[in-house]
Image: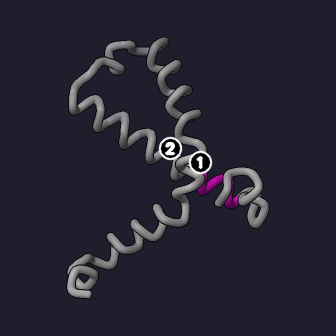
Amino acid sequence: FYFQEQIPKSANKLFGVLADYSFGVFFLHYYILLALKRGFEHIKPEILEGGYINWLLQFTLVVGLNLVLVYIIKKITESNSRYLIGC
């Protein structure tokens, strides 16, 4: 396909990682959101207020933490990670 040829290889690798970890991210993101919300409420509550910059920072933080957590769980539990986080 023409569109696939235009995507850089680094983007394909990123999309591959997201595809591999997608169910684990889906499964864990709620718990990470709760933990971050509680943490920010105690540290700096104004971070939770609206705004595009705050939303973008929170989104990036949640996705990044999810990917790192799924990666760590997969490394620790190896083939049994499917039973724990579904991927």
Residue 14: quarter of image:
bottom left
Please, which colouring scheme is shown? one colour
Q: Say the numbered circle drawn on residue 36.
A: none
Image position of 35 with respect to 28: above or below: above
Say whether residue 20 is left or right of residue 12: right
Report the residue at 25% width, 76% height from top: 7
Q: Does the magenta segment cover residue 8?
A: no
Q: Does the magenta segment cover residue 70?
A: yes
Query: Which residue is more in the foreground, 34 or 26?
Result: 26
Report the residue at 67% width, 56% height from top: 86
The residue under label 2 is 65
The residue under label 1 is 69
Q: Amino acid at mark 2?
A: Leu
Number of numbered labels in the structure image: 2
Image position of 47 with respect to 57: above or below: above
Say whether residue 55 is left or right of residue 43: left
**In which quadrant is the N terminus drawn?**
bottom left
Image position of 40 with respect to 81: above or below: above
Indicate the secondary structure of the residue bearing disc 1.
helix
Query: Which residue is more in the foreground, 4 or 46?
Result: 4
**Circles 1 and 2: CB atoms closer than 8 Å:** yes
Residue range of the region highlighted in magenta in the rendering: 69-75
**In which quadrant is the C terminus drawn?**
bottom right
Report the residue at 41% width, 72% height from top: 13
Instruction: Determine crowd level at label 2: few under 14, some 14-19, many 20+ residues with C-alpha closer than 10 A.
Output: some
Residue 80: quarter of image:
bottom right
Q: Amino acid at mark 1?
A: Leu
Report the residue at 32% width, 70% height from top: 11
